[in-house]
Amino acid sequence: MASCAIGSIDRRLGGPDNPSGEIGYVFSVATDPGRRRRGYARACLEALRGWYRERGVTKIDLRDRAEAVRRSP
């Protein structure tokens, strides 16, 4: 496997900008160090966004850690 992205759908209290209260949560994105900088993580995230879109989820929460961003091989 070159890369993967894992997410879930959480249900929270709805509001005016999100009546259903459903929020997509991306909690893991990883790419094999030897395969970085080829667009694999982006493709995984786009697929995950499509999965959310198919289910009517319009808000997505993605948090990162500074030490996980743009690691060099």
Image (cartoon, rainbow, N blue to C red):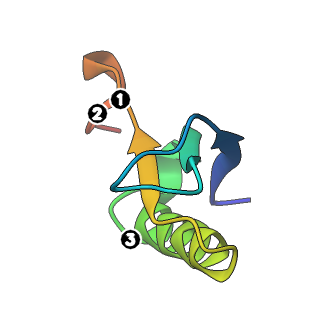
Name which residue lies at 28% across and 33% down.
69
| CA–CA distance in space, label 2 to label 3 | 15 Å
The residue labelled by disc 1 is: 64
Q: Is residue 14 above or below residue 45?
A: above
Dot label at residue 38: 3
Q: Nearer the viewer, mark 3 or mark 1?
A: 1
Residue type for callout 3: Arg
Q: Which quadrant of the rendered structure holds the N terminus?
A: bottom right
N-term-proximal mark, 3 vs 1: 3
Location of residue 9 in the rendering, given as x and y in whole percent from the top left corner:
69, 48
| Callout 2 crowding tier (Cα within 10 Å): few <14, some 14–19, many ≥20 | few
Residue type for callout 1: Asp
Q: Is residue 14 above or below residue 1?
A: above
Quarter of the image for residue 26 reads top right
Dot label at residue 69: 2
Location of residue 73 in the rendering, given as x and y in whole percent from the top left corner:
35, 39
Q: Is residue 12 above or below residue 56?
A: above
Q: Nearer the viewer, residue 19 or 1?
A: 19
**Res. 25 in view:** yes
| Callout 1 crowding tier (Cα within 10 Å): few <14, some 14–19, many ≥20 | few
Q: Is residue 47 above or below residue 5?
A: below
Cβ atoms at labels 1 and 2 below 8 Å apart: yes
| CA–CA distance in space, label 3 to label 1 | 20 Å
